[in-house]
Amino acid sequence: IIKPEETLNVTWSPASVNNAVAGVTNLVGTLSGTDKIEVSADKKAALKVTVKEKVYTTATVDAGFTASKAYDVDTTANILSELSASYPTVSVKFTNSYGHELTKTESITWSAPANFNAGKVGTYTFEGTVSTSGVNYTGSAVKVTATVKINSLKVLSVTNPADIEVFVGDTITLPAKV
């Protein structure tokens, strides 16, 4: 009889467990006797190893992330393109219920608000959807915002219209725009 405080060396089969894939592996251990302890071949140890997926349920965007740009009157496509170039990624911390944390740099896809008019002066809030690719994330969509200000255009120069010559008594039509 082995005393409870005595331990024996064991050789497990299989010798290793794949921790890159979720699943259950049952191992059988062959015990090694000592000069004082004899172990019969039918005495085996058993071990069940469960590898769990790290499922992340919360995502927190870097608190230092701010996006703000000013543009002259332009097109929506140009503004979205410039936002994507200026703010292509953000750092996100993913957390699961076991306290595991994973910080990754994720890409942002920007979209204009429904009320946006690239030709109208004003301040608008654009929304960015943050990618969660490569992360087993089950929480709600990760969003960021950007403040976009459309500035009025400034007249830098004026091109005068062509001079008008008419005969006495003719109607003079002045240009409505210059």
Image: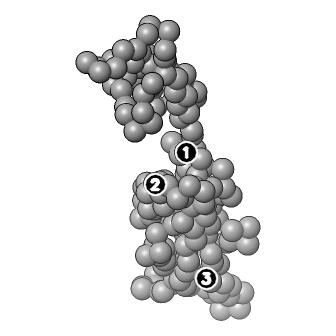
Q: How crowded is mark 1: few (under 14 residues within 10 Å), some or many (20 or more)?
A: some
Identify the amino acid type marked 1.
Lys
The foreground one among 47 and 117 is 47
The answer to which of marks 2 and 1 sits earlier in the sequence is 1
In the rendered image, the vertical position of residue 142 relative to residue 52, given as above or below: below
Neighbour tally class for label 3: few under 14, some 14-19, many 20 plus, Cα within 10 Å: some
User: Which residue has dot 3 on it?
Assistant: 123
Q: Residue furthest front?
A: 1
Q: How crowded is mark 2: few (under 14 residues within 10 Å), some or many (20 or more)?
A: some
N-terminal label among 2 and 3: 2
Residue positioned 52% across, 23% down in the render = 46
Nearest-to-viewer mark from 2 and 3: 2
Mark 2 lies on residue: 102
Give amino acid for label 2: Leu
Q: What element carries label 2?
A: strand
Report the front residue among 32 and 69: 32
Which residue shows up at 55% across the image and 50% down it? 132
Q: Do the residues labelled 2 and 1 touch (CB within 8 Å)?
A: yes
Disc 1 element: loop
Which of the 4 image quarters holds residue 60? bottom right
Q: Name the residue under label 1.
A: 54
Residue 64 in the image: state x and y as whole percent: 43, 76
Looking at the picture, which amino acid does disc 3 mark? Thr
Q: Residue at x 36, y 15 (%)?
A: 38
Quarter of the view holding residue 13: top left
**Mark 2 vs mark 1: in front:** 1
What residue is drawn where x is 55% and y is 45%? 54
Question: Between tags 3 and 1, which lies in front?
Answer: 1
Please report whichever mark, 3 or 1, sits nearer to the chain's N-terminal start. 1
